[in-house]
Image: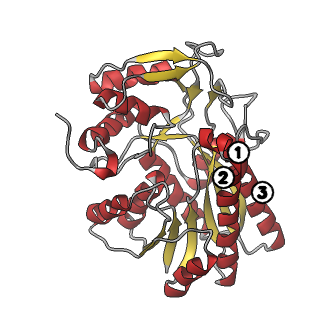
Amino acid sequence: MAILITGGAGYIGSHTCVQLISQGYKIVVVDSLSNSNIESLNRVSELTDTEFPFYNVNLLDPDSLERVFEENHIDSVIHFAGLKAVGESVLRPLDYYHNNLTGTFNLCKVMEKFHVKKIVFSSSATVYGNPKLVPIKEDAPLSATSPYGQTKLMTEQVLRDLFEADSGWSIALLRYFNPIGAHLSGRIGEDPTGIPNNLMPFISQVAIGKLDQLSIYGNDYATVDGTGVRDYIHVVDLAKGHIKALEHLMGTTGVEAFNLGTGKGYSVLQMVKAFEKATRTAITYSIAPRRPGDIAECYADSTKAKKVLGWVAEKEIEEMCRDTWRWQQRNPHGYKHDQVLT
């Protein structure tokens, strides 16, 4: 039996593939490659010395998805696939709703047809909207400040309703905070298309000379230094959380949400200083106006994940910064080129 990984060529998906294979699991990967690169999966094979089935399939194409299930013995799914840029979702809401929701509908229908009822869903801390209290617990009020966040929130509700209709389902909703870092090898990492939407790849591209400077959006929040505070988690810790969630699903039915974060908040300026210290590289930055939809602070209470899943984040901020920098130095142009800038 195998685990289907949708969106497995992406940043978190590729790291999760490595962890799964290293722990003896068989995987099948589906990815449309619309916002990822096949080279990431080539490197997953290289790192694990393992070949695995890959299908260039969009979840909006249910017939092709059915073929994946027909040709493989799938017993569970980790669902990463989706459009994922908050700012872009504000500009292209219909694309985000259509892709992320319809893709999930198709996936669940095909899963039902093949009697596969275990799924780990890649959700997000964006489902908490602008939280009134931090650290955030799973029972905090839910809302969203962008179409991207709404698609995560709506998908969570769809999966809850699916379980209400059929109690044979076993579902984990993993609410990520801010994944950063890269595999220790420097062979796989975050490879954003165009100008990065997330802080750490932006910082690292400034450090490598690909971008001129970092724009810090807002320095007048009610935080330690006026810049936004977030919970940054190493992508390898996050990948391990998926395996813990999957193992939990194997012996139970139901639907549960879990925060995956460190429980520590770092401001943008603190992250800049941590990166400079870890890499001995100066980061040029300027202050820009706040962005619509941004919030002051957001960090996790991950007590439930520790208690129920036996999972805790292990890596500290310095290691996250070093691993990000190693990936960036060895892959200055992401997966497009292998040469190192000198």
Count of picture labels: 3
Residue drawn 44% across the image and 23% down it:
214
Residue drawn 62% across the image and 66% down it:
119
Q: Vertically, is 26 above or below 12?
A: below
Q: Tag 1 or tag 3, which sits nearer the N-term?
A: 1
Q: Nearer the viewer, mark 3 or mark 1?
A: 1
Q: Quadrant of residue 98?
A: bottom right
- Indicate the quadrant containing the C terminus: top left, top right, bottom left or bottom right: top left
Name the residue type under label 2.
Answer: Tyr
Name the residue type under label 1.
Answer: Pro
Give the secondary structure at mark 2: helix
Residue 298: horizontal and vertical position, in percent? 63, 31
Q: Can you identify the residue that label 3 sits on?
A: 157
Q: What is the image's colouring? A: secondary structure
Q: Can you identify the residue that label 2 sits on?
A: 96
Q: Tag 3 or tag 2, which sits nearer the N-term?
A: 2
**Is the residue under label 2 in contact with that under label 1 (CB below 8 Å)?**
yes
Q: Tag 2 or tag 1, which sits nearer the N-term?
A: 2
Query: Can residue 276 be spotted in the picture?
Result: yes
Q: Vertically, is 191 above or below 38?
A: above
Residue 49: horizontal and vertical position, in percent? 26, 68
CA–CA distance in space, label 3 to label 1:
15 Å
Within-10-Å neighbours for mark 1: few <14, some 14–19, many 20+: many
Residue 191: horizontal and vertical position, in percent? 40, 46
Q: Nearer the viewer, mark 2 or mark 3?
A: 2
Q: Can you identify the residue that label 1 sits on?
A: 147
Residue drawn 76% across the image and 28% down it:
132
Give the secondary structure at mark 1: helix
Residue drawn 70% across the image and 76% down it:
109
Q: Quadrant of residue 156?
A: bottom right
